[in-house]
């Protein structure tokens, strides 16, 4: 198969994957699939010929449009992950503050006898 055509297929599949809503429970699987596709794209880009036919140039234009969309979708996924991490951090801090209130009350008192 033509390298440019294969690159177009992989990029299109990546865009389709990222367009679908991603559930939090399945996010790790989607990220693994994205990494595999990005790695395959990287390998195909290394084998891209320097001289392109007119047909390949048209496919290249389609690739550029898809690539912009993929970058935008990846940026959205990154923002979702960052937002979830921020929310987890805030929840953890709230739980820690709640626990700290009761930790300070558990101090044992001691009595020192000054007489000898």
Image (tube, rainbow, N blue to C red):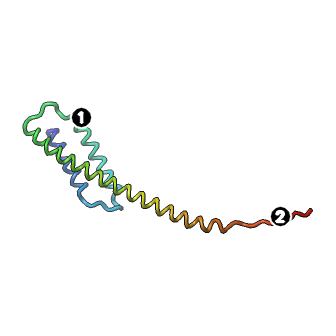
Instruction: Tell me the crowding category of disc 1: few under 14, some 14 to 19, or many 20 or more residues within 10 angstroms, Cα based.
Output: few
Can you identify the residue that label 2 sits on? 112
* Residue found at x 17% / y 44%: 63
Q: How many labels does the image show?
A: 2
Tell which residue pokes out farthest to the right in this image. Answer: 116
Task: Establish if 97 lies above or below 17.
Answer: below
* Residue found at x 42% / y 58%: 86
Q: In which quarter of the image is the N terminus?
A: top left
Q: Quadrant of residue 16?
A: bottom left
Provide residue 25's location: percent of width, then percent of height: 36, 62
Mark 2 secondary-structure assignment: loop
* Residue found at x 14% / y 45%: 62
Can you identify the residue that label 1 sits on? 46
Tell which residue pokes out farthest to the left in this image. Answer: 54
Mark 1 secondary-structure assignment: helix
Task: Establish if 51 lies above or below 77.
Answer: above
């Amino acid at each position: 198969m033509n390298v440019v055509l294969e690159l177009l297929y992989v990029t299109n599949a990546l865009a389709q994957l990222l367009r679908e809503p991603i559930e939090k429970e399945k996010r790790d699987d989607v990220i693994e699939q994205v990494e595999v596709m990005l790695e395959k794209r990287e390998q195909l880009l290394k084998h891209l010929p320097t001289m392109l036919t007119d047909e390949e140039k048209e496919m290249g234009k389609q690739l550029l449009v898809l690539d912009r969309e993929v970058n935008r979708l990846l940026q959205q996924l990154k923002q979702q992950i960052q937002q979830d991490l921020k929310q987890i951090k805030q929840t953890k801090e709230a739980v820690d503050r709640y626990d700290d209130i009761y930790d300070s009350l558990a101090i044992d008192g001691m009595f020192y006898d000054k007489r000898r």
